[in-house]
Image (cartoon, rainbow, N blue to C red):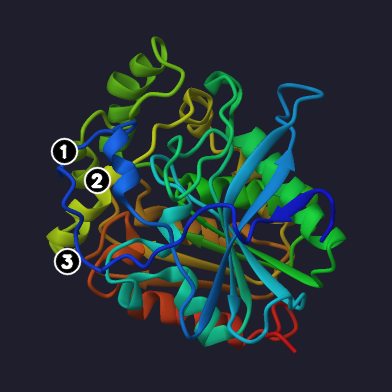
């Protein structure tokens, strides 16, 4: 392995999560020490899961060094394959767990389904500043939250891609959700070092409700805390993320996993700088649009689709009735299957392990 990052095969004990909601209190807030009762993801018959670390610098702290921690998912029997990897950037409040939630993993796990169905590897990291200390889902290092902007996170994502390339990966794709889509789009457009781009729960048109939430609630929170609980409480957060097409038990199971959010990311997401970079992206693009999204309006999709001027392979999938937490509604497995099928149909961009 390249010196820049490390696969930690024995870094933490791994245990299978039972597949139902945790006994933890559903109103647990970020930082609750009881959250360590959750278990880290474990390998199964189709997917090998290994803890992995990357060293990156924070763009706004020249000379700094921080560790990003997460998990590498590989097709079972093809460990060490360097053909293709899909690198993931999660949203505000979430983490590496977003891609492999500890609730009915055989149904809702994004990482596992993509690896199993497309035959490529999947990299799920906690972004800079994300995660809870001593949690089985492994926390990344936490700089001053005001320095962790969307641009800095996109740059950190680029650094990870460069390390993957240095370690021999021939093809690297990006997948993002919400703010992670913004950062993935910045990464793809600015650095031009990836082979495919998948965006979920994201357009460049914020809803009026979300705009008001940012102005009246989130920005004031950042003035007193560089790592606030974005949305302030679970009830508000859930109302923005889910519709009645989501399983209430799944929603409750996710509550204890919610992470605090860097203030710099909250303060810098508004202008959505990636809109200026989308015309430079010349790789295959897939966007998953939730038509009942309460954060990024589906009405912005036609405009966004037209901005990918340099790509001759742009797909926008629209899903009625679901909210911002796209893959966590009852049809989430079918949506993730659409992603895996899209990847499989593009062997020049992200070929399966040889």
Q: Which residue is mark 1?
A: 27
Total number of numbered discs in the rendering: 3
Q: Judge left or right: residue 272 versus residue 216.
A: right
- Is residue 339 something one can see in this rendering? no
Q: Earlier in the sequence, mark 3 or mark 1?
A: 1
Give how far across and how far down residue 68 sits, in percent: 63, 43
Residue at (21, 37) in percent of width and height: 28
Q: Which residue is mark 3?
A: 245
Residue at (63, 87) in percent of width and height: 77
Quadrant housing the N terminus: bottom right
Distance (Cα) linking label 3 and label 1? 21 Å
The kind of secondary structure element at disc 1 is loop
Q: Which residue is mark 2?
A: 255
Label 3–label 1 contact, CB within 8 A: no
Distance (Cα) linking label 1 and label 2? 7 Å
Q: Earlier in the sequence, mark 1 or mark 2?
A: 1
The kind of secondary structure element at disc 2 is helix
């Amino acid at each position: 392995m390249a010196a820049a990052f490390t696969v930690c095969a024995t870094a933490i004990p791994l245990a299978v999560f039972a597949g139902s909601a945790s006994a933890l209190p559903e109103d647990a807030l970020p930082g609750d020490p009881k959250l360590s009762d959750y278990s880290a993801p474990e390998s199964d018959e189709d997917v090998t899961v290994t803890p992995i670390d990357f060293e990156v610098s924070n763009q706004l702290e020249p000379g700094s060094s921080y560790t990003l921690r997460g998990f590498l998912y590989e097709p079972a029997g093809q460990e060490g394959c360097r053909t293709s990897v899909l690198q993931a950037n999660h949203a505000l409040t979430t983490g590496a767990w977003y891609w492999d939630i500890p609730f009915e993993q055989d149904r809702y796990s994004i990482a596992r389904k993509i690896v199993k169905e497309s035959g490529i590897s999947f990299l799920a990291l906690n972004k800079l500043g994300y995660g809870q200390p001593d949690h089985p889902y492994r926390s990344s290092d936490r700089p001053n939250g005001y320095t962790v902007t969307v641009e800095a996170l996109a740059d950190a994502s680029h650094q990870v891609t460069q390390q993957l390339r240095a370690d021999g990966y021939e093809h690297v794709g990006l997948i993002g959700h919400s703010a992670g889509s913004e950062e993935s789009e910045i990464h793809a457009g600015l650095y031009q070092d990836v082979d495919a781009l998948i965006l979920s729960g994201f357009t460049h048109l914020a809803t009026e409700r979300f705009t008001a939430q940012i102005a009246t609630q989130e920005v004031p929170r950042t003035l007193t805390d560089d790592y606030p609980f974005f949305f302030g409480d679970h009830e508000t957060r859930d109302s923005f993320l889910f519709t009645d097409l989501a399983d209430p038990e799944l929603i409750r199971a996710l509550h204890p996993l919610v992470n605090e959010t860097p203030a710099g990311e909250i303060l810098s997401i508004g202008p959505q700088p990636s809109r200026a970079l989308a015309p430079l992206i010349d790789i295959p693009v897939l966007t998953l649009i939730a038509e009942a999204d309460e954060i990024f309006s589906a009405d912005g999709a036609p405009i966004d689709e037209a901005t990918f001027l340099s790509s001759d392979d742009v797909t926008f999938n629209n899903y009625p009735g679901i909210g911002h937490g796209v893959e966590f509604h009852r049809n989430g497995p079918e949506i993730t299957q659409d992603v895996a099928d899209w990847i499989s149909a593009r062997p020049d961009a992200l070929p399966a392990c040889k």
